[in-house]
Amino acid sequence: MPKRTFWFVTGTAAGLGSSLWVQRRVRTTVERYVPEKVQERAADAARRVGPAVRDAVTEGRDAMRAREAEMRADVATRVSRPAATDRRAG
């Protein structure tokens, strides 16, 4: 009889402990996916990513402006050259 009591109490304690652990785990998971929490996490992620995106856009604009200036200089050089004489006209 004492063995049965021991194992009954041990099983009850294990079941109760597991039940409490699962309840806590479910509660924290549910709280994590409440709309307010999801919104907070999304806002935090946007705040972290924002500066990197801004830097990338700035770098892209600078590269674009540099390339445009290079192309404009190339066009200006071509336009300012004296026109080659037409060999057919003679």
Image: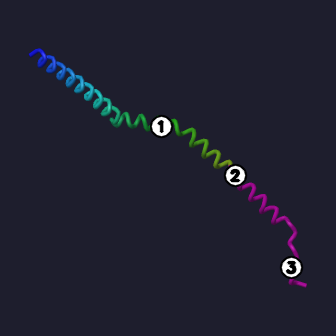
Query: Could you tell me how far apart the alpha carbons at marks 3 and 1 are, in whole angstroms?
Result: 64 Å
- Would residue 81 appear left or right of 50 to someone viewing this image? right
Residue stretch rendered in magenta on the structure: 63-90
- Which residue is identified by label 2? 65
**Badges 1 and 2: C-beta atoms under 8 Å apart?**
no
Are there few (<14), some (14-19), or many (20+) residues within 10 Å of tag 2?
few
User: SS at mark 3?
Assistant: loop
Query: Could you tell me how far apart the alpha carbons at marks 2 and 3 are, in whole angstroms?
Result: 36 Å
Are there few (<14), some (14-19), or many (20+) residues within 10 Å of tag 3?
few
- Which residue is identified by label 1? 45
Disc 3 marks a residue whose amino acid type is Asp
| Near-viewer residue (32 or 22) | 22
Disc 2 marks a residue whose amino acid type is Arg
Disc 1 marks a residue whose amino acid type is Ala
> Which percent across, then down, holds residue 20?
24, 24
Question: Is tag 2's residue or tag 3's residue first in the polypeptide sequence?
Answer: 2
Q: Residue 68: which quarter of the image?
A: bottom right
Q: Residue 4: which quarter of the image?
A: top left
Q: Residue at x 49, y 39 (%)?
A: 46
Does the magenta portion include 67?
A: yes
User: SS at mark 2?
Assistant: helix
User: SS at mark 1?
Assistant: helix
Q: Residue at x 45, y 36 (%)?
A: 43
- Which residue is identified by label 3? 86
**Badges 2 and 3: C-beta atoms under 8 Å apart?**
no
Q: What label does residue 90 carry, if any? A: none
| Quarter of the image with the N terminus in it | top left
| Near-viewer residue (36 or 49) | 49
Query: Where 16 falls versus 49 (above or below)?
Result: above
